[in-house]
Amino acid sequence: MIRGDARHTGLPSGSFDLVHARTLLVTIPEPAEVLAEMVRLARPGGWVASQEPDVEHALCYPPLPAWDRLSEIFLAAFTRAGADPHIGRRLTEMYRQAGLADIQVQVHAGAYPVGHSRRTVIPDLVRSLRPVIAQRGLASDGELDEVDRAVRRHLDDPDTLMMPHLLVAVWGRKPARAS
């Protein structure tokens, strides 16, 4: 196992045919720095690929006010340190700016059934962000407990449609060296 900073891995340049990240860029400030490292690690003619969410079009139907409140709390807490929950839409632009060519994009809108871990990803993330939520005064413990219970009860209903985010997959080729 190799551990390192995704911005400065210390691995040799041009070492890989494919460099891939999934739901990493969404969580960090300055994601272009990680993308630059990914490009550096790809061999000329190699590929860089990533899958990142865009939560603007999250869907919970039938509507539930507790879902709306949970989503509001999530966005306020998640972006606290520069994370970008809408990064999926920016990936192709970031790839172009990083010098990649032959850029392709595919967007997937997953709707998850009861029991699937992605169905509760937003409430699960809110649970993990409770210390940040409390520190920023975004919601009280009582409100969080109430909203969490209501949302999970709603998501336990198989007739509730849940789509937590769009998942944007982008890949591009590192240009071959000029002769």
Image: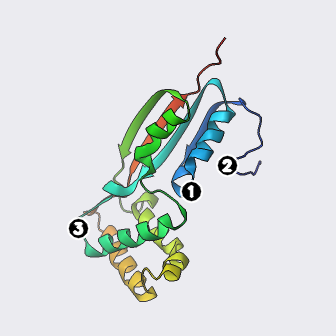
Marking on residue 90: none
Q: Nearer the viewer, mark 3 or mark 1?
A: 1
Q: Position of residue 10 (x, y in %)?
A: 77, 43
Q: Quadrant of the C terminus?
A: top right
Q: Residue at x 56, y 56 (%)?
A: 29
Q: Residues within 10 Å of mark 1 (few under 14, many from 20)?
A: some
Front tag of 2 and 1: 1
Q: Position of residue 41 (x, y in %)?
A: 68, 34
Badge 3 is on which residue?
63
Q: Residue at x 47, y 70 (%)?
A: 77
At 34% from the left and 56% from the top, the residue drawn is 56
Q: Which residue is mark 2?
A: 6
Residue under label 1, please give it.
29
Pick the residue in front: 162 or 39. Answer: 39
Q: Amino acid at mark 2?
A: Ala
Spot occupied by residue 173 in the image (x, y as percentages of width and height):
55, 26
**SS for dot 2:** loop
* Above or below, comparing residue 116 to residue 170 in the picture: below
Looking at the image, is mark 2 or mark 1 earlier in the sequence? 2
Q: Compute the Cα span from label 3 to label 1.
A: 32 Å
Along the line of sight, the residue nearer the viewer: 154 or 97? 97
For marks 3 and 2, the one nearer the N-term is: 2
Q: Kindly identify the residue that appears in the image at 76 percent across and 39 percent down.
A: 11
* Image x and y of residue 7, in percent: 67, 48
Nearest-to-viewer mark from 3 and 2: 2
178 or 3: nearer the eye?
A: 178
